[in-house]
Image: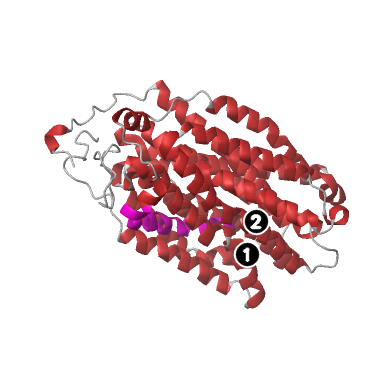
Amino acid sequence: MNPPSAVTPPSPPTADTPNIRTVAWATMIGTAIEWYDFFTYGIAAALVFNTLFFPAGTSPVVGTLLAFSTYAVGFAARPVGGVVFAHYGDKIGRKSMLVVSLLLMGGSTFCIGLLPGFPTLGVAAPLLLVALRIVQGFGVGGEWGAAALMAVEHAPPNRRGFYGSWPQMGVPAGMLIANLAFFALSGTTSDHDFQAWGWRVPFLASSVLIALGLVIRLRVSESPVFRAMERAGRIERRPVIAVLRTQPANVLRAAGIRFAENSTFYIHTTFVLTYGTTVLSLERDDLLIGVIITAALGLISLPLWGRLSDRVGRRPVVLFGSALLAALSWPFFWALDSGSLPVIYLVTILCINVGNHAVYAPQSAYFAELFEPEVRYSGASIGSQAASVLAGGLSPLIATALLEAGDGYHLIALYMTAMALITVCTALISPDPYRQSLKRSSTPGDRDARPTESTTEMSHG
């Protein structure tokens, strides 16, 4: 490690530069398009795929389990995408990974919109659906790391949490567009038409959005941290292996911090459509309105939580959000069972915009700060995407199985509580290097992101 005298702390920017604003918009808009594709699939899995891609006569619960199984397959592919994209993102740059991931997501989503159902193709229909879903998951698994690091590594030191929340805003933005598309279609088409062709429109429309995303993402410049590594000859030959060898604890920390928000989010936004319509006989459109409201509010709540993490640190914000998610596990179902839409909407806002977003907003900055720059893409992506399989991808499937196995929602609420407590425990034993430089030492070491005098940014505001 270089002595303190060899490191000159960077001067903080006096104002946000046009470049960081362009990067912030590019990461948010591009991520919104990719998550639009992902949520379009999730909504269709809950509303259409249980009957369209499986044999006639399949019971509603079994059909839903099969549909959510194809949903989970996409999450299983995300760590693979995360590893592959991370390897090249740490070797050749963050920007190129943004473009490739967008093309993979867009192409697979468009093809799903063209895919015939079981009556036409037989068993080939669900097999092709699974294959396209794998491509979707592979693309989104690599996308997050690139978008998060582009935003954080371009940002001023004292606003990394704020700008790191912009790619996170792509999730509610994509969810908002996807739900609005399905809401508009379900309101203007009959149930027969919606099942026959209406559900395909959002998938096919993604081609226009992908073209827009490419134009935006091709305009941004490469991460200055990566450019500095290139100039210094500090490119790691095998970054994935290096991060697992030198910083395994931080990979596990990144995964554990994701459990609370990732598992509960897909129950609050995807499984709720199945539970509300099949168990409680609530109107599908009423539930979609609740999801749309929280998605719109997410465009406000996420940057606010990100900015707060710049002031008080990432860990206190994550602890607050994950503890609140644990506390709201049972009240969420009490609200649904009440049948009162204002109560349902209020509790859903508390779950998503307060609890979930407090955990989610700081993650781009938090994960970037945990890892050395040479292995940062690899560490952040592997930790994040591993949690997406164990927590996010399986949660609708587990919730559906628990609903069938138990008496009501109690086992589901217990499961949600356990997932949130994993994040609480992880955050309690994790460092909070939010004042630390992103440039670090000349060689990656097993420091688990503990700040040293030579790497602490004395200029942090």
Q: What is the x, y in percent for residue 343?
A: 58, 58
Q: Residue at x 63, y 47 (%)?
A: 135
Mark 2 touches mark 1? (CB < 8 Å): yes
Q: Nearer the viewer, residue 100 or 30?
A: 100
* Residue 271 vertical placement versus 181 (above, below): below
Q: What is the x, y in percent for residue 412?
A: 57, 69
Q: CA distance from mark 2 to mark 1?
A: 9 Å
Q: Residue at x 20, y 31 (%)?
A: 9
| The magenta segment | 244-266
Q: Amino acid at mark 2?
A: Tyr
**Observer able to see residue 301:** no
Q: Residue at x 23, y 29 (%)?
A: 10
The residue carrying mark 2 is 71
The residue carrying mark 1 is 397
Q: Is residue 441 left or right of residue 287?
A: left
Query: Which quadrant of the rendered structure holds the C terminus?
Result: top left
Q: Residue at x 37, y 57 (%)?
A: 253
Disc 1 element = helix
Q: Nearer the viewer, residue 299 or 434?
A: 434
Among the two numbered marks 2 and 1 on one chain, the one whose residue lies closer to the N terminus: 2
Q: What is the x, y in percent for residue 1?
A: 18, 42
Q: Amino acid at mark 1?
A: Leu
Q: How is the image coloured?
A: secondary structure
Answer whether residue 250 is magenta in the image: yes
Disc 2 element = helix
Q: Is residue 367 left or right of residue 203?
A: left
Residue closest to the far front: 237
Total count of labels = 2
**Observer able to see residue 168:** yes
